Amino acid sequence: MPAPQKLLQALDDFRSLGDRELQSELLIEYAERFEQVPETVAKRPFANEHRVPACESEAYVWAKRSGEGVQFYFAVENPQGISAKALAVILNETISGAGVEEILSISEDLVYDLFGRNISMGKGQGLMGMVRMVKALAKTV
């Protein structure tokens, strides 16, 4: 099964910008739209099992069943965690509501598609960890 259609469309739109500077500006715009997990889902201090391993920005992920799909919620504790916030918004806007099989089809290469191959090893591992965690949580709800 292919990745969620909304995610594929967002990637196509992102790639169509072509210019890395324009793509970076778009990622910053995504990050500016970030909203922390609502307190109805999770309250601080957040449970460690929701923390994304290897994420330098201290990102957390929660998932809840929503009809036939899965709804995701994110927290990013590092105020400078622009990349983590941008990825959280992209994932939330494009895969929340998708079915489990669609979510499981998402490739970790999504990180390279969005942030480029020159991303630092630490940042790349953290962002890929967010994708892995989304997929793992989708299996459990």
Image (cartoon, grey):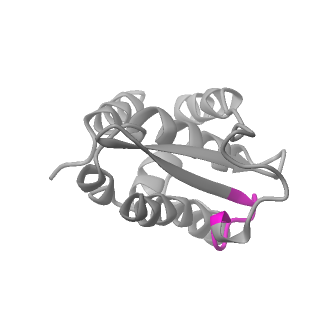
Task: Residue 107: give x, y in percent of width and height.
Answer: 34, 60
> Does 65 sit left or right of 106 as displayed?
right
Q: Residue at x 24, y 55 (%)?
A: 101
Q: Residue at x 84, y 53 (%)?
A: 44
Residue 129 lies in quadrant: bottom right
Q: Residue at x 47, y 46 (%)?
A: 114
Task: Residue 5: give x, y in percent of width and height.
Answer: 25, 35
Task: Residue 92: give x, y in percent of width and height.
Answer: 50, 38
> Does 2 sit left or right of 87 as displayed?
left
Residue 127 lies in quadrant: bottom right
Residue 50 lies in quadrant: bottom right
Task: Residue 4: give x, y in percent of width and height.
Answer: 28, 41
- How many numbered circles are shown? 0
Q: Is residue 56 magenta?
A: yes
In this view, the residue in front, 42 or 115, is 42
In this view, the residue in front, 42 or 105, is 42
Q: Quadrant of the C terminus?
A: bottom left
In this view, the residue in front, 39 or 74, is 39
Q: Residue furthest left?
A: 1
Vertical order, 95 against 48 (above or below): above
> Does 47 sit left or right of 20 as displayed?
right
Q: Residue at x 66, y 34 (%)?
A: 31
Region rendered in magenta? 50-59
Vertical order, 50 against 79 (above or below): below
- Tell me the chief SS of the magenta region: loop
Q: Is residue 35 magenta?
A: no
